[in-house]
Amino acid sequence: MGIGPGSFAPETLLVAIGNSGRGDDGLGWAFANRVRQAAGFRGPIEYRYQLQVEDAELISRAPRVVFVDACAERLPGGYEWRACQPARHFEFSTHALEPGTVLKLCHDLYGAGPAALLLAIEGARWALGSGLSRRAERNLRRALDAFAQGPPDSACNGYPVARGNCGAGSAESTG
């Protein structure tokens, strides 16, 4: 898999969220590993078990951020692009923060507002243990193909509006 020309500018930050020791929760990291091995993507790649307050500073330096995380929801085609907007209110948790909460902190603390997307990838198995389920592997390949094409050019400034509860804060997708 190569990343399509012009799919993502070199300053695009990829933030992979997950835990490779919890089955399909490792989808974000597996995605980042394969993108790192592929030709074409030149942006920085960061790995996180979960999003934290400190990540607001990290993303404040990027004009565009793509969060990649596992999802317990059924998704059309096994993955879904979702626009990320800053949360309206700060919601603190000692466990994990949603991408929108980190974006709000980024705006409030650093005056930055990067364009942000979540690439949610459907998983099936969340128990302790390494390796992905067959469904997760299939969905990972589909998501990588979609990433190589670049985000869709549709609603919400070129990206579909988020729905459901996937990402850093959903119980099934974090350790």
Image (tube, rainbow, N blue to C red):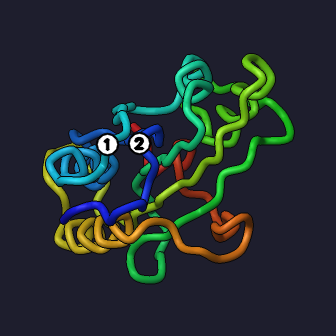
Work out whether mark 2 precedes mark 1 in sequence or the reverse, and give the earlier one: 2
Secondary structure type for disc 1 = loop
Q: Dividing the picture into quarters, in which one does residue 94 lie?
A: top right
Q: How far apart are marks 2 and 1 (CA)?
A: 5 Å
For the question of whether residue 95 can be seen, the reply is: no
Q: Residue at x 17, y 54 (%)?
A: 38
Q: As rendered, which of 94 and 140 lies closer to the eye?
A: 140
Q: Is the residue marked by circle 2 packed among few (<14), some (14-19), or many (20+) residues within 10 Å?
A: few
Task: Report the side of 86 relative to 43 (left or right).
Answer: right
Counting from the top left corner in percent of width and height, residue 106 is at 69, 26
Location of mark 1 (residue): 42
Q: Residue 102 carries which label?
A: none
Counting from the top left corner in percent of width and height, residue 149 is at 38, 71
Tally the numbered discs: 2
- Residue at the far bottom: name it: 76
Image quadrant in which the N terminus is located: bottom left
Q: Which residue is drawn at 30% across and 74% down?
A: 142
Q: Residue at x 41, y 60 (%)?
A: 6
Image quadrant in which the C terminus is located: top left
Q: As rendered, which of 124 and 138 lies closer to the eye?
A: 138
Counting from the top left corner in percent of width and height, residue 104 is at 75, 33
Question: Residues at badges 2 and 1 in contact (C-beta under 8 Å)?
Answer: yes
For the question of whether residue 69 can be seen, the reply is: yes
Q: Residue at x 59, y 38 (%)?
A: 63
Residue type indicated by callout 1: Arg
Residue type indicated by callout 2: Pro
Secondary structure type for disc 2 = loop
Location of mark 2 (residue): 10
Task: Report the side of 120 relative to 164 (left or right).
Answer: left
